[in-house]
Image: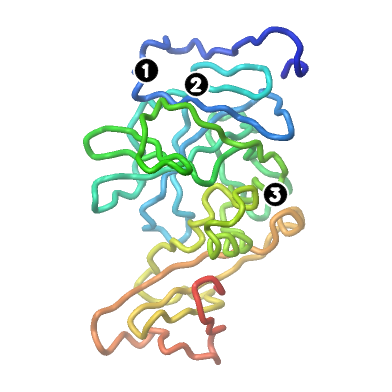
Amino acid sequence: MLAACGGAQEQSIVDTGVADIATPQGRRLRVKVDGATPLDTNGLRATLAWWGDGLDATRRPLVFQDLRVISMTNTWPIELELAVEESPPSGAIHYALGYRQAKLVVYRDDNANSVLDFTPVLADAFVDQIVAFHPDVYVWYYDNGDFRLALPGAVDQVELSTPFTVFERSMQVESCAALDWTPHRTLFTARNPYSDPSQRGPWDAEAVMPVACPNNEPPPDTRAVWCDTNYAFRASWSTPTSTFVSEKCGSVFRTCQARRSDLSGPPTWPCPCDPSKWACVQTMFDL
């Protein structure tokens, strides 16, 4: 639990499962959690959410890598030292320029399995709760094995162990980011990526980073189609949710994309969009 503000001397909660010396400085994150509402440290953990390879249209393109807590203060603001003990997990997308990219999220591990779990959209409560993040902090991993940090306002990337702050975002709506479907509300901030950070989720850009459509055709449940050109489209579809998810997060969707280079596409190719079959939208943000 947190000590009262201005109260007893700071103490640390230390994970003693592995000696601190086992993790080199270049594989440590030093994070301060600050904000308006002090957090109880019970059950707090941190994860890196890597952009996924997008090969499966039935899953969100995110891959989580839980981090070992070396130390965590039990005063406010909370200071965490985290060990990044492995390279990015399988399924993290590898960009052509030789890197992978992730966001850091602090969460409450309500089911105590040491993993940030996606919440099914028919659930009556969040499986785990997102409680802190900064939408403009990125962790980069390069092919040479180096981890680097990209911090807001910084021109150059810095050492992974450079201290930085994430902000308490413990209202339940923030945990909508960890549904197993994408909330429609994220399309607004994906359209406005430089809006107020306090109004943005941890990985809203994922809403416009769709996976590949199976067989290069709109899935059977497609609701809307956006034809970028007659050679490229994106499709979206929705699903029913529980009353809990509807009230906390609103509607949800998934999206996929496909491209072709030939002049005559397959019979199932949806472009030009036929309004008798789908909602034909004008931009990807309308999906």
Number of the label disc, if any, that sits on residue 251? none
Given residues 112 and 234, the one toward you in this image is 234
User: Which callout, 1 or 3, points at the residue further toward the start of the chain?
Assistant: 1
Q: Which of marks 1 and 2 is in front?
A: 2
User: Which callout, 1 or 2, points at the residue further toward the start of the chain?
Assistant: 1
- Percent x, y for residue 88? 35, 37
Quadrant of image for the C terminus? bottom right
- Percent x, y for residue 246? 73, 59
User: Which callout, 3 or 2, points at the residue further toward the start of the chain?
Assistant: 2
The image's colouring method is rainbow
Q: Is residue 221 above or below residue 194?
A: below
Please state which amino acid type lies under the numbered disc 1. Answer: Thr
Q: Residue at x 59, y 49 (%)?
A: 197
The residue pinned by badge 1 equals 23
Quadrant of image for the N terminus? top right
The residue pinned by badge 3 equals 173
Classify mark 2: helix, strand or loop.
Answer: strand
Q: Residue at x 46, y 37 (%)?
A: 48
* Distance from Cα at disc 1 to Cα at disc 2: 11 Å
